[in-house]
Image: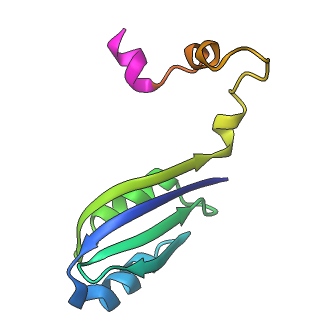
Amino acid sequence: MNIVSLVLRIHPETRAAAEAALTAYPGVECHGMSDDGKLVVTVEDAEGAAMSDTLIALHRVPQVLAATLAYEHCDAMLDDVPTSDAPFSNQSQALKSPCEEAQS
């Protein structure tokens, strides 16, 4: 299972149109919104829809002014975590992020 949470910035008066457009995408749910237009959205894997394609599509919804990734969970990432009792510092060396790999 993959799930991400986003904070989308929209004009508060466009909330109804924004939520209608956003929830038309598979796996997308809209949650609470602040008075200044910060809308919390979650996106889950959906059959036949790549998560990356859905995230790109959400950025293109006309009412969305900006999007910030707040949280990401991916079960597949857990398969790569070492299970030994080694200290965390040794485990973190085994888990290279794409950013670290690009710098080396």
- Identify the image quadrant of residue 16: bottom left
Residue at 69% across, 36% down: 78
Q: Residue furthest right?
A: 84
Residue at 27% across, 65% down: 60
31 or 58, which lies in front?
Answer: 31
Q: Residue furthest top?
A: 104
- Residue 87, above or below 43: above
Residue at 64% across, 62% down: 47
- Identify the image quadrant of residue 19: bottom left
Relative to 95, 25 lies left or right:
left
Q: Estimate the x, y position of residue 5 in percent, counting from the top left.
A: 47, 60
Q: Estimate the x, y position of residue 55 in percent, counting from the top left.
A: 40, 58
Magenta stretch, main secondary structure class: helix
70 or 42, which lies in front?
Answer: 70
Q: Estimate the x, y position of residue 27 in percent, counting from the top left.
A: 56, 69
Relative to 23, 36 lies left or right:
left
86 or 83, which lies in front?
Answer: 86
Residue at 67% across, 39% down: 76
Relative to 85, 54 lies left or right:
left
Q: Quadrant of the C terminus?
A: top left
Please say whether residue 102 is one of the residues in the magenta stretch.
yes
Please say whether residue 49 is one of the residues in the magenta stretch.
no
Q: Which residues are magenta?
A: 98-104
